[in-house]
Amino acid sequence: MYIKNLGELKALAYEKQLTFAYLACERLYPNYVHFSNHHVFGDPTALKEAIAFIRSAILAKTLNHTQRERLLHAVNEHTPLPEDFDSILASSALDATSVIFHTLDFMGDQHSSSLEDISNAATDSIHMFLQSKLSLDYLSPDFENIIMQHPLMIQEVHIQEGVITYLSKIDKIEEEDLETLLAMQDKEGKGNLGL
């Protein structure tokens, strides 16, 4: 586990936890779009619809269970299997859909274990991407250190920790908070892999 203050997130109100998950969905979504465009697979608009649903639930503080179930099926339908593609981008796209799926699932059961899955999917996506991009040997003694010191991983860890710190300091989630948090993690529409 790379995120030092993840335990603090589990103690926050549900809307704040959902906000953390929503922001991860937004960060990983461009990775899916990049994969979809290059491999002519899936439907990014189905995932974007799910993300918009999550955002609206944060602000409205209500949940349409029928819509959530429909979106769970839609996300699952557009999830790639990495073994079907000769590209590390398939794993990145899988992580993006996993984060959205876990978030929709979390909205139903509110189990805090989903938050760790969401956090880990975001860092694991970078971990696998860097391992492939840099042709790293996982048996090398410097393997983990090289990944942890890479700017992409440092940025992801800082974003997650910064979001948790921000959420810990506010009373409730407002529209302007979502905009501020989105601006904190914006990479010019490039997702957490910088693609």
Image: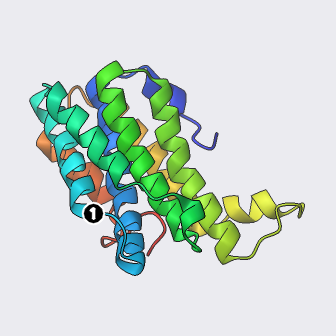
- Give the residue furthest to the left: 60
The figure's colour scheme reads rainbow
Q: In this view, does 144 lie to the left or right of 51?
A: right
Query: Where is mark 1, residue-wise?
Result: 44
For the residue pair 76 and 124, the one nearer the viewer reads as 76
Q: In this view, does 140 lie to the left or right of 29?
A: right
- Give the residue drawn at x 32%, y 48%: 75
- Where residue 15 sits: x, y (%)? 26, 28
The answer to whether residue 169 of the structure is visible from this angle is no
- Where residue 177 sits: x, y (%)? 20, 43
**Dot 1 amino acid type:** Pro
Q: Is residue 143 above or below residue 195?
A: above
Quadrant placement of the C terminus: bottom left
Q: Is residue 72 above or below residue 153?
A: above
Q: Is residue 101 left or right of residue 63?
A: right
- Give the residue drawn at x 31%, y 54%: 26
Splitting the image into 4 quarters, where does residue 64 fall?
top left
- Give the residue drawn at x 36%, y 76%: 40
Q: Is mark 1 on a helix, strand or loop?
A: helix
For the residue pair 130 and 175, the one nearer the viewer reads as 130
For the residue pair 171 and 21, the one nearer the viewer reads as 21
- Give the residue drawn at x 30%, y 30%: 16
- Where residue 9 sits: x, y (%)? 44, 29
- Where residue 136 sits: x, y (%)? 77, 71
